[in-house]
Image (cartoon, grey):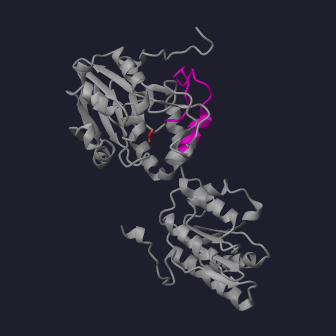
């Protein structure tokens, strides 16, 4: 036995539950996944094989470059002629890469994908790779393998529209796809043997699942009642020791937290600003004063000079309205504002109210640039941005109060503020 007790000998499947084998692949050298995710520990592409009295099911495959490892493990526990069923919980290429070759080797097998996956299947597996027959699965649909029953749970947008989970009823095994996964490659395979992967688990959630929090909560409603002896995700350790912990962690991470701070009928309006000479700061104060005058709206004002960007993401996620104040410098909004806006891609901002304002010297592009970005992030921008040339007069500060009031009124549905739709809203 070596120091890390290598469970994943090349060419050998690993039994993870009675009659259930891990037949995936290890990618320890990966450091960047999908361009945006870092991993200090590589990743795994987990695939599983379930044996029933009447045949074998393969659940998910691996990334194309790793299919040799996958097929060698598969062949250690089954013949291709035994494969009756292939399930793809998610069609992203890290899980569908070996599908064409698997279908070629097991042409008798039926392929099951989620009801939302059809167009993706066609787009990912082009005609020159063969047209596949497939079945579309929905929540509650079952496959009988002979003493083994696979049941589907439709869990869309975690993190693609097509994603689903598959539950092996007799053993209480949830094949969860990317849900409960993480990029952490450890040849000890199981959560009670692998190194401490809590950071990777939370990091994966934050970057992959967090933008779809409401869908996470819907999926947890489906998963919650299941008896869980094992959670078998598509990446990272197989969760056999107290698997319910990981469900509960998702519950914590996806729960709204601002409720404890806000009154039941209050809406949260956050105003962020950056100021060179105090002019945009004075505008921000006036915008806040105006917004504060609208009943049911709680204002928070933040000078970005005094804060790191990252902690604001949690507040923004649960806020109802956001305003950003930036001076225009060299024809652009200032970097701290862009840094904050660029950090928001992991958050679902759809439908929040957005606004922009700022002082400028001669051209004043920052406000419209920020507004465009807000629309791109799917916020509503119901009130045209407020620009003031250099030092605001008292009349101009009153205009800022009016601006803040209009944005707040749009938030609570008062004042007849006209709603400006982004074209993307109409698609
Ligand atoms: Fe692991 Fe979304 O693919």
Looking at the image, is 137 positioned above or below residue 67? Answer: below
Residue in the picture at 40% in, 23% down:
68
Res 23 seen here: no
Where is residue 273 drawn, in percent x and y? 70, 70
Residue in the picture at 59% in, 31% down:
41
Q: On the picture, is 161 further left or further right than 299?
A: left
Residue in front for this viewpoint, 228 or 383: 383
Q: Is residue 193 magenta?
A: yes
Where is residue 248 drawn, in percent x and y? 52, 38
Residue in the picture at 40% in, 47% down:
160
Where is residue 280 drawn, in percent x and y? 72, 76
Q: Residue furthest front?
A: 128
Residue in front for this viewpoint, 223 or 203: 203
Res 182 seen here: yes
Residue in front for this viewpoint, 20 or 255: 20
Picture quarter with the N terminus: top right
Where is residue 332 drawn, in percent x and y? 65, 71
Q: Which residues are magenta?
A: 181-205
Q: On the picture, is 32 further left or further right than 288?
A: left
Q: Is residue 341 magenta?
A: no
Q: On the picture, is 302 further left or further right than 34?
A: right
Q: Residue furthest right?
A: 277
Looking at the image, is 282 positioned above or below residue 425? Answer: below
Picture quarter with the C terminus: bottom left
Quadrant of residue 132 in the image? Answer: top left
* Quarter of the displayed picture in which ligand 1 can be seen: top left
Q: Residue furthest top?
A: 1
């Amino acid at each position: 036995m070596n120091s890390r007790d290598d469970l994943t000998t090349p060419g050998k499947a690993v039994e993870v539950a009675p009659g259930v084998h891990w037949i995936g692949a290890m990618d320890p050298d990966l450091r960047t996944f999908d361009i945006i995710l870092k991993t200090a520990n590589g990743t795994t592409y987990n695939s599983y094989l379930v044996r029933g009295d009447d045949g074998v099911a393969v659940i998910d495959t691996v990334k194309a470059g790793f299919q040799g490892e996958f097929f060698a493990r598969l062949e250690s526990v089954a013949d291709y002629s035994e494969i009756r069923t292939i399930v793809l919980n998610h069609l992203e290429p890290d899980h569908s890469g070996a599908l064409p070759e698997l279908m070629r080797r097991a042409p008798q097998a039926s392929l099951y994908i989620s009801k939302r996956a059809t167009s993706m299947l066609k787009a990912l597996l082009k005609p020159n790779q063969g047209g596949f027959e497939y079945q579309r699965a929905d929540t509650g649909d079952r496959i009988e393998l002979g003493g083994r029953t696979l049941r589907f749970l439709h869990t869309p947008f975690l993190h693609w529209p097509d994603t689903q989970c598959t539950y092996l009823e007799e053993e209480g095994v949830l094949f969860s796809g990317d849900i409960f996964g993480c990029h952490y490659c450890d040849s000890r395979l199981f959560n009670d043997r692998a190194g401490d992967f809590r950071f990777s688990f939370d990091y994966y959630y934050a970057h992959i699942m967090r933008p779809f929090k409401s869908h996470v909560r819907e999926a947890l409603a489906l998963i919650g009642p299941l008896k869980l002896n094992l959670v078998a995700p598509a990446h990272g350790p197989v969760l056999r020791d107290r698997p319910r912990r990981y469900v509960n962690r998702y519950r914590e991470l996806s729960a709204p937290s601002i409720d404890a701070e806000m009154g039941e009928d209050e809406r949260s309006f956050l105003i962020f600003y950056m100021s060179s000479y105090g002019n945009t700061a004075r505008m921000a104060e006036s915008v806040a004063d105006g917004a504060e005058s609208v009943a049911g709206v709680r204002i928070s004002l933040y000078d970005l000079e005094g804060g790191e960007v990252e902690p604001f993401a949690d507040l923004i996620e649960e806020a109802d309205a956001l305003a950003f104040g930036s001076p225009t410098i060299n024809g652009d909004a200032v970097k701290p504002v862009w840094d904050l806006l660029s950090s928001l891609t992991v958050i679902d901002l759809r439908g929040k109210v957005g606004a922009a304002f700022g002082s400028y010297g001669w051209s004043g592009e920052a406000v419209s640039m920020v507004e465009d970005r807000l629309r791109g992030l799917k916020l509503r921008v119901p009130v045209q941005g407020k620009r003031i040339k250099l030092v605001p007069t008292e009349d101009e500060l009153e205009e800022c109060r009016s601006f803040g009031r209009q944005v707040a009124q749009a938030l609570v549905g008062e004042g007849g503020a006209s709603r400006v739709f982004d074209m993307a809203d109409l698609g």
